[in-house]
Image: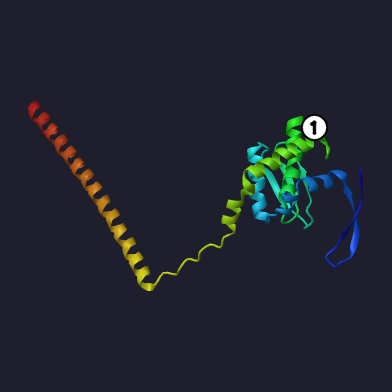
């Protein structure tokens, strides 16, 4: 069972929303994971990493809205997952947990059940073990160094280097064809000598 909870909007007014007990329990239990949010592109990478590790197949990933919520369609191997923009790790794990449960138990498992909580704990522990891919995320968020435009002199040198490389390739090809030409000439000379000997022998 759940209940009504009053939450404060951005304009300062409060509005009632229905919140289930399992939802409150998840927020309380995984408070840090709910606070850790990632951008959409990072969320796509994380979904793919988790799905690959637990062998859940490939997912089409969509984003809609900004409330930390989502849905998933699939039967334990691939499907479609819809997440809010800038989702939290808790939301990503929660949605993928539906597929993990279906893969493990071959049926739908309700929120808040012991089986669902056990599989969700597995997903959360895996993210914790990977330190929420923080090193990789930080590396992706670092601004890329700007490439310096080459000077006119550098451009000239690059053109000269390319032209010299072409010359070397052409010289190599010339040597190769010269060897083939010499070999063909020797073959023709040998065939002519053999033909001449046969003509002499017939007389």
- Count of numbered labels shown in the rendering: 1
- Position of residue 43 measured from the top left corner of the image (x, y, whole percent): 67, 51
**Residue placed at 14% from the left, 32% from the top?**
195
- Position of residue 185 measured from the top left corner of the image (x, y, whole percent): 18, 42
Asked if residue 54 lies left or right of residue 191, the reply is: right
Choose top left, top right, bottom left or bottom right for residue 56. Answer: top right
The residue identified by callout 1 is 107
**Residue placed at 79% from the left, 48% from the top?**
27
Which of the pair 145/30 is nearer the observer?
30
The quadrant of the picture occupied by the N terminus is top right
Which of the pair 166/120 is nearer the observer?
120
* Local crowd size for mark 1, using a 10 Å CA cut-off: few (<14), some (14–19), many (≥20): few
Which of the pair 158/128 is nearer the observer?
128
**Residue placed at 12% from the left, 29% from the top?**
198
- Position of residue 58 measured from the top left corner of the image (x, y, whole percent): 66, 41
Q: Where 23 sits versus 56, above or below? A: below
Choose top left, top right, bottom left or bottom right for residue 25. Answer: top right
- Position of residue 156 measured from the top left corner of the image (x, y, whole percent): 34, 69
């Amino acid at each position: 069972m759940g209940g009504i909870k009053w939450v404060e909007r951005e304009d300062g007014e409060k509005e009632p929303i229905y919140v289930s007990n399992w939802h409150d329990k998840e927020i309380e239990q995984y408070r840090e994971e709910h606070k850790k949010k990632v951008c959409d592109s990072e969320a796509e990478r994380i979904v793919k990493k988790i799905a690959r590790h637990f062998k859940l197949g490939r997912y089409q990933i969509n984003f809609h809205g900004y409330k930390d919520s989502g849905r998933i369609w699939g039967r334990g191997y691939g499907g479609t997952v819809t997440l809010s923009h800038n989702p939290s790790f808790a939301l990503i794990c929660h949605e993928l947990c539906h597929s993990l449960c279906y893969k493990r138990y071959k049926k739908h498992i309700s929120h808040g059940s012991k089986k669902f909580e056990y599989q969700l704990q597995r997903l959360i522990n895996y993210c914790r073990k990977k330190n929420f891919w923080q090193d990789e995320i930080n590396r992706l968020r670092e601004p890329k160094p700007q490439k310096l435009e080459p000077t006119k002199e550098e451009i000239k040198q690059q053109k000269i280097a390319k032209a010299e490389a072409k010359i070397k390739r052409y010289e190599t090809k010339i040597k190769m064809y010269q060897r083939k030409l010499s070999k063909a000439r020797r073959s023709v000379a040998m065939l002519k000598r053999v033909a001449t000997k046969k003509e002499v022998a017939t007389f």
